[in-house]
């Protein structure tokens, strides 16, 4: 069972969007029992807060519910627990490498690497206000990720 952790700065916009989009995709593919999917933050700023309302509304526009999700910060133990840990931007990746002491098992990456956009970053809608653009990027990354993982198995 692939265990995937999506990571962004606060775990209230991009990474929970990725978590719930991926959960929706695997469910629609009839594979939800074969995946473990979650999300976390690199910072402690939003700990315990729910998904940001505009992100929640964007997910709902596409029929995806994310109720009950609250922000949590990733921990050093997450490196052992998860098979794949995907950040939304380069700052997320740097923060993860710093906490994890590098990436000896090659588990870290960016979500858009799976959308044939290696090194591309998903813009933070907290600052841009463009939750639709974030949705499109997250969906493209998650669709590519699911395709890559199902090809391997």
Image (tube, grey):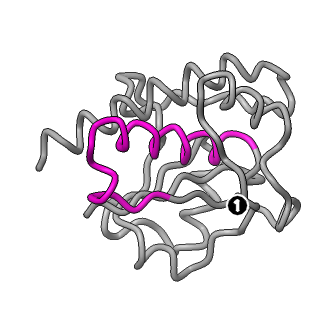
Q: Residue at x 78, y 19 (%)?
A: 130
Q: Residue at x 41, y 65 (%)?
A: 103
Q: Residues within 10 Å of mark 1 (few under 14, many from 20)?
A: many
Stretch in magenta: 13-37
Say if 10 sits above or below 47 in the image: above
> What is the secondary structure assignment of the residue under circle 1?
loop
Left or right? Give the position of 31 relative to 23.
left
Say if 15 sits above or below 97 in the image: above
| Residue 30 colored in magenta in the image | yes
Q: Position of residue 11 (x, y in %)?
A: 72, 53
Query: Mark 1 — residue?
Result: 42
Left or right? Give the position of 87 relative to 27.
right
Q: Where on the picture, by quarter, is residue 88?
A: top right
Q: Nearer the viewer, residue 94 or 116?
A: 116
Q: Position of residue 141 (x, y in %)?
A: 44, 31
Q: Position of residue 42 (x, y in %)?
A: 70, 61
Which SS does the magenta portion mostly show? helix
Left or right? Give the position of 138 relative to 26.
right
Q: Residue at x 68, y 30 (%)?
A: 60
Q: Residue placed farthest to the bottom in the image?
A: 77
Q: Position of residue 39 (x, y in %)?
A: 59, 57
Q: Nearer the viewer, residue 135 or 85?
A: 135
Q: Quadrant of the N terminus?
A: bottom left
């Amino acid at each position: 069972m692939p265990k995937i952790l999506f990571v962004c700065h606060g775990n209230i916009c991009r990474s929970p969007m990725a978590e719930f989009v991926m959960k929706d995709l695997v469910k629609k593919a009839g594979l939800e029992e074969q995946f473990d999917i979650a999300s976390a933050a690199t910072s402690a700023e939003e700990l315990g807060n729910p998904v940001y309302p505009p992100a929640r509304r964007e997910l709902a526009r596409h029929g995806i519910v994310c109720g009950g999700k609250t922000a949590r910060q990733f921990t050093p133990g997450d490196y052992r627990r998860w098979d794949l840990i995907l950040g939304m931007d380069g700052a997320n990746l740097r923060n993860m490498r710093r906490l994890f002491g590098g990436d000896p098992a090659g588990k870290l990456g960016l979500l858009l690497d799976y959308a044939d956009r290696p090194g591309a970053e998903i813009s933070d809608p907290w600052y841009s206000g463009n939750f639709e653009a974030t949705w499109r990027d997250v969906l493209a990354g998650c669709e590519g990720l699911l395709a890559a993982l199902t090809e391997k198995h």
